[in-house]
Amino acid sequence: MTRPPSLRPSPRLSALCLGLGTLSFATGWILVALAAPEMEDFFYQPRVLAITHTFTLGWISLTIIGVLYQYVPALTKRPVWWRRGPLVQVSLFALGASGMIVHFWIDHLDGMAWSAGMVLLSVVLLAALLLPSLVRAPHYDATVLGIVAGIAGLVGTATLGTMYAIDKVHPYLSGSVLSNIAGHAHLGLLGWITVTICAVSYRMVAALVLPTELFPRSARAQMIALVVLVPLLVTALLLRAHDLAIVAALLVVAAIAWYAVLLWRLLRTR
């Protein structure tokens, strides 16, 4: 009797993502040691940005992508529509991220812009591979909504990053450089990393502790609040609306605190 084909991509792909992520983590700390004097002066410098992207792209993002390729098909009970797509996507992402880090480190703007475009292309491919299954998921709970929003946040982050990279070569953007970078950073850290971790953890923690009760409505409401507030904060930062940014930041903190309370209640049921 033959086994039905697996819904998930090969586990080797996720192992590759985790391996590259671990390598990036170690490399990041080596770069920290090399660039320590520059980090003491000011954060917006090429080598400091190289370190930042080593951790955010090479370590955190690749690790999350590796998890999603195993988790999303299992969650939606649907395979990725292009079997070789994940390997192509991860390869493009790794090459683009490596190019960005190297060209940031040597302060080569043209190469950095091309590498950022490759990362954007890979991120769009990631969305094309995973979103069709998520859209057809049987239940739009906190996990499904959060992963969809997280992938959208990653696409938005890569888009802004590519725009800023091109602007360094051919200036065309208005506004403050620091406010633009703040919007880009907050969208990545909150809209991609935080939202995705919150979304996945709801089900993973429940699977580990086997609670006697769940909080689907509260969790879904918390996720919707976070998904709405993060773009509001990013928009306020980009527009340099300081008062709105402060209010939005406080509301984002409240939404994350709400998440912590829900997880605590989930754990207390055991």
Image: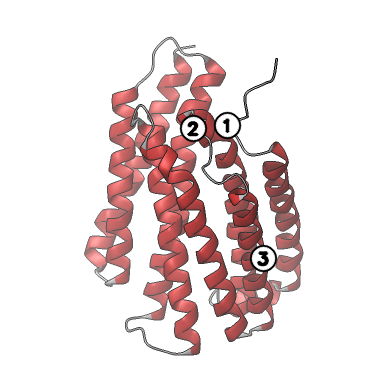
Residue under numbered circle 2:
78
Q: Quadrant of the N terminus?
A: top right
- For the residues labelled 2 and 3, the Cα–Cα distance comes to 28 Å
Check contact, mark 1 vs mark 2: CB within 8 A: yes
Assign a secondary structure to mark 3.
helix
Of mark 1 and mark 2, the one earlier in the sequence is: 1
Q: How far apart in space, not on screen, are marks 3 and 1 (Cα)?
A: 26 Å
- Amino acid on which the number 1 mark rests in the picture: Leu
Q: Residue at x 33, y 41 (%)?
A: 255
The answer to whether residue 54 shows anywhere in this view is yes
x, y (%) of residue 165? Answer: 50, 78
User: Who's the residue at 41% across and 80% down the image?
Assistant: 177
Q: Which residue is mark 1?
A: 7
* Residue 269 position within the rendered picture, expressed as x and y whole percent measured from the top left: 44, 13
Q: Is residue 83 above or below residue 172?
A: above
Tally of numbered tags? 3
Residue 39's spot in the image, x, y percent?
63, 73
Labels 3 and 1: the sequence-earlier one: 1
Q: Identify the residue under disc 3.
A: 95
81 over 30 or under it: above or below: above
Q: Nearer the viewer, residue 72 or 62?
A: 72
